[in-house]
Image (cartoon, grey):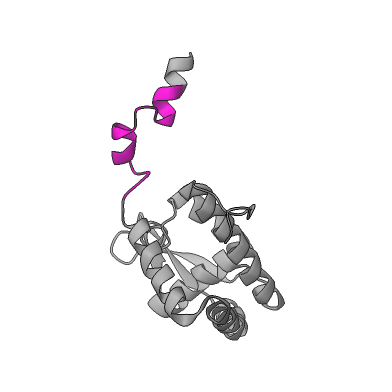
Amino acid sequence: MSQDDPLRTLCNCLALRQASRHVTQFYDQVLAPSGIRTTQYSILHRAQTQGPLTVNALADQLVMDPSTLTHNLRPLLKDGLVVLEVGRTDRRQRAIAITPEGQGVYRKARPLWLRAQADFERAVGNTQATALRDLLATVARTGLGQGEAEAEAPLAPKAASRRRR
């Protein structure tokens, strides 16, 4: 990227968001014939490969808060692709399970997702794609945004909003 490139930024957050939007749009286009989007594919994939998962366990795996996951589950529940079952060890919990209809959509989406993966790796390079996933996993494990950074940041959003009152 040249210095004049309008996509070039020094802001880590903006750079990640720009790349994320671009890659999400690409995967969503490739997955479109299956009728689901990238986030829905991720949910179905986890339910298919790991069996029923509690909302909290799946949210943790997807690095998503439970309310966002619940929002993303609504169309899958409405379309009968997943169901919420009573938890196996705690009846107060709900576990997300894929239905036979969901398995059919997953089987249709899987080769499309594999094509998107291959196209991405061809465009970026296999070595760089692997390095990118490793780096992003490291970033996701930092714990940023889960309280510790707020305590150290001099103008954390909560503190800044209190000062304006």
Which residue is depicted at the point 46% across and 22% down? 161
Q: Is residue 76 left or right of residue 165?
A: right
User: Residue 36: where, in percent of width, then height?
Assistant: 64, 70
Number of callouts in the render? Answer: 0
| Closer-to-camera residue (69/146) | 146
Q: Would you identify the image quadrant in which residue 105 lies? A: bottom right
Query: In the current view of this chain or complex, which residue is farthest to the top?
Result: 165
Q: Would residue 82 appear left or right of 138 to someone viewing this image?
A: right
Estimate the x, y position of residue 35 in percent, counting from the top left: 69, 73
Give how far across and how far down residue 46 sits, in percent.
Answer: 44, 72
In the displayed image of the protein, which residue is found farthest to the right? 33
Taking depth in this image into account, of 20 and 75 the one nearest to the observer is 20
Q: Is residue 164 visible?
A: yes
Between 41 and 155, which is closer to the camera in this rendering?
A: 155
Residue drawn at the location 36% of the way across and 69% of the way down:
134
Is-magenta flag for residue 91?
A: no
User: Does the magenta run of residues contain 150?
Assistant: yes
Q: Would residue 32 appear left or right of 148 to someone viewing this image? A: right
Q: Quadrant of residue 31?
A: bottom right
Q: Which is nearer the eye, 13 or 1?
A: 1
Q: Is residue 67 left or right of residue 147?
A: right
The reply to whether residue 70 is visible in this rendering is: no
**The residue stretch that appears in magenta:** 143-160
Above or below, 40 relative to 156:
below
Q: Quadrant of the N terminus?
A: bottom right
Q: Residue at x 38, y 76 (%)?
A: 50
Q: Residue at x 61, y 54 (%)?
A: 7
The image shows residue 22 at horizontal and vertical percentages of 62, 62
Above or below, 2 against 148 in this view is: below
